[in-house]
Amino acid sequence: MVCLGNICRSPLAEGILKEKIKQHQLDWVVDSAGTGYWHVGEGPDQRSVAVARQRGIDIRDQRARQLRSKDLEEFDLIFAMDTSNYRSIVNMAPRPALSEKVHLILDLIYPGEGRSVPDPYYDDYGFEGVYDMLEEACDQIIVKFR
Ligand code: 4NP
């Protein structure tokens, strides 16, 4: 799960998908990262922590890290939160074929529409809606890839 800062959207996506794979007893490895370096080592944004907690998941033990090109080798699926992240990730691919692993996460709900999860960093009220979209997308990830 990849966004820009790895403190707002992708930590929620990681937490939600981990909860769902537990419910479905799958043995997937789920992680998140940012394309940017500014927040490396920080915990998730307090507003993400709060909305997750309201929905029953605890994401406080996550720490932000920056995406490495090696992640494109090691992970089978990479989900970008927005079109800008998508382009950054594809541009990092050490081999062009690896870019086939990269998906825009909302394409799972709205195939081919190229929609982005809005960046809630500057919008205190955006976090609930982001959670709802990510939860719906994670349900589809389980349906499509299990
Ligand atoms: P995220 O949100 O990509 O969902 O983690 C952001 C976090 C930090 C910044 C931008 C977006 N920033 O500019 O520092």
Image (tube, helix red, strand yellow):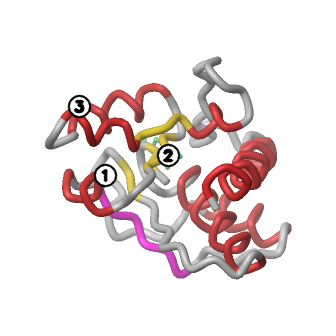
Classify 58 as above or below 2. Answer: below
Looking at the image, which is closer to me, 81 or 54? 81
117 sits left or right of 54 in the view:
left
Q: On residue 137, which mark appears?
A: none
Q: CA distance from mark 3 to mark 2?
A: 14 Å
- Identify the magenta region: 61-66
Element class at badge 1: loop
Estimate the x, y position of residue 7 in percent, counting from the top left. Answer: 50, 57
Q: Is residue 107 above or below residue 35?
A: above
Position of 141 with respect to 53 (left or right) is left
Amino acid type, residue under disc 2 in the picture: Phe
Mark 1 vs ligand 1: CB under 8 Å? yes
- Identify the residue position indicated by label 2 in the image: 79
Q: Determine crowd level at label 1: few under 14, some 14-19, many 20+ residues with C-alpha closer than 10 A.
A: some
The amino acid pointed to by label 1 is Trp
Q: Which residue is mark 1?
A: 38
